[in-house]
C-alpha cells in the first residue's frame, strides 16, 4: 500500500502549528513516507505568514512526496447552506489543487454525540453531488467522511449511502478504523464497499476500554497495533477488494506530540509497517 502521513501526527491541526511545514515535509520524507496529507489551516497559515502554495508544492516535489488529500470542507452538508459557504468550499478546493491534490475531505455538519440530529441522506447526497460537480470544473473532488463521535453522519453505512445516492463517478468515502469503531459500524461491512468507493483509508488504532468505546475522541487514538482494532483483517479485506490507494496514518494523540518530532513519526511508521507485515503485505 502507499504509505501516507497525515500532519495531525505532528501537532494539533486545529490551532497554529507548533511544527513548521517545511519540517513536516522533511521529516516525513526522511522517515520513508511517499505521501503527505495536509490540512487547510496549515496551508492557510503558511500563506498568511508570507509563503505561497507554489512553495509548498515545490517542497513536496523536492522531497519526493505527493499530497493525495487535503482536509477539510466544512459547512456544506447542513440545510440552509448559502453562497458564502459554497464559496469557501471552492476556495479550499483551489488551495488543495494548488499543492497537487486531486481529493479533499468533505466533513459533515452535525452535533457531537450523544445529541443526535435528524439526517436526510437524500438531501446530504444532493449537496455532496453539488460539490462533486464543482470539482468537475476544478479537477479536484471531495470524499465523503463519517465521524464516529458526531450525531449526524457517524456510520459507514450512512456515508456509503450518500456516495451511492450522489450517483457521480468521482464519489468516494473516507474509510477510518477509529470511526468504524467509535461510530458502531464495526468492520464486517467494509467487505461490502467497492474499492472504487474508497478515496483514502486513514489508519490508526484505539484502546479497548480506557476510556470506554463510545466516549472516545480523536485524542485517544494510538499507534497501529497498540490498540484493540482488527487492523490486520481490515487490511486483508481492503486488498481483497482491490484497494490500492493511500494508507494515511492519522493520530491526534497529545502524548505523541510531546515526543521528539522525528521519533514520533518514526514510531508511527514502524507500527504501520509491523501491521502490514502481519497482514502479509
Image (spheres, grey):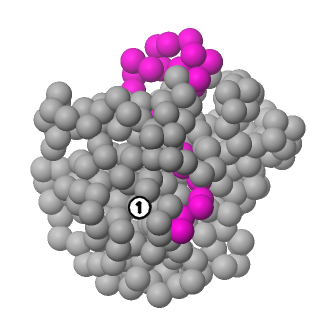
Q: Is residue 137 above or below residue 238?
A: below
Is any atom of residue 39 visible in this view? Answer: no
| 165 to 38, vertically: above or below | below
254 within the magenta span: yes
10 Å crowding of disc 1: few (<14), some (14-19), many (20+): some
Identify residue for label 1.
237
Give the magenta part as a residue range.
Answer: 242-266
Residue 264: give x, y in percent of width and height: 53, 20
Is 230 positioned to the left or the right of 272 in the image?
Answer: left
| Quarter where residue 131 is shown | bottom right
Q: Is residue 32 above or below residue 95?
A: above
Q: How many marks?
A: 1
Residue drawn at x 75%, y 55% is 100
Res 153 quadrant in image:
bottom left
Q: Nearer the viewer, residue 239 or 149?
A: 239
Nearer-the-camera pick, 26 or 140: 26
Residue plotted at (33% across, 78% down): 161
49 vs 192, left or right, is: right
Give percent across and percent down for residue 7: 57, 36
What is the secondary structure assignment of the residue under circle 1?
A: helix
Give above or below for 210 relative to 83: above
Magenta segment includes 63 = no
Q: Please state the horizontal and vertical placement of residue 138, each as a whole percent of the image.
A: 71, 72
Q: Residue placed at 38% from the left, 54% from the top?
A: 234
Coordinates of residue 51 in the picture (x, y in percent): 79, 35
Is residue 248 shown to the viewer in this render?
A: yes
Frontmost residue, 15 versus 185: 185
Amino acid at each position: 500500500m502507499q504509505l501516507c502521513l497525515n500532519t495531525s501526527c505532528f501537532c494539533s491541526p486545529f490551532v497554529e502549528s507548533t511544527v513548521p511545514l517545511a519540517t513536516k515535509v522533511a521529516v516525513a520524507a526522511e522517515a520513508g513516507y511517499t505521501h503527505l496529507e495536509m490540512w487547510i489551516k496549515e496551508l492557510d497559515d503558511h500563506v498568511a505568514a508570507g509563503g505561497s502554495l507554489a512553495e509548498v508544492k515545490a517542497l513536496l516535489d523536492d522531497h519526493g512526496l505527493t499530497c493525495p488529500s487535503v482536509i477539510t470542507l466544512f459547512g456544506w452538508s447542513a440545510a440552509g447552506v448559502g453562497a458564502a459557504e459554497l464559496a469557501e468550499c471552492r476556495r479550499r478546493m483551489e488551495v488543495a489543487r494548488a499543492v497537487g491534490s486531486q481529493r479533499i475531505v468533505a466533513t459533515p455538519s452535525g452535533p457531537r454525540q450523544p445529541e443526535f440530529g435528524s439526517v436526510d441522506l437524500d438531501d446530504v447526497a444532493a449537496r455532496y453531488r453539488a460539490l462533486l460537480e464543482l470539482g468537475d470544473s476544478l479537477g479536484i473532488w471531495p470524499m465523503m467522511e463519517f465521524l464516529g463521535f458526531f450525531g449526524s453522519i457517524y456510520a459507514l453505512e450512512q456515508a456509503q449511502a450518500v456516495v451511492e445516492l450522489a450517483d457521480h463517478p468521482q464519489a468516494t468515502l473516507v474509510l477510518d478504523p477509529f470511526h468504524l469503531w467509535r461510530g458502531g459500524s464495526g468492520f464486517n461491512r467494509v467487505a461490502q464497499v467497492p474499492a472504487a468507493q474508497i478515496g483514502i483509508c486513514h489508519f490508526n488504532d484505539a484502546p479497548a476500554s480506557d476510556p470506554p468505546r463510545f466516549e472516545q475522541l480523536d485524542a485517544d487514538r494510538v499507534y497501529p497495533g497498540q490498540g484493540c482494532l482488527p487492523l490486520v483483517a481490515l487490511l486483508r479485506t481492503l486488498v481483497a477488494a482491490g484497494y490500492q490507494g493511500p494508507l494515511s496514518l492519522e493520530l491526534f494523540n497529545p502524548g505523541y506530540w510531546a515526543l521528539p518530532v522525528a521519533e514520533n513519526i518514526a514510531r508511527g511508521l514502524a507500527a504501520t509497517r509491523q501491521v502490514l507485515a502481519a497482514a502479509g503485505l
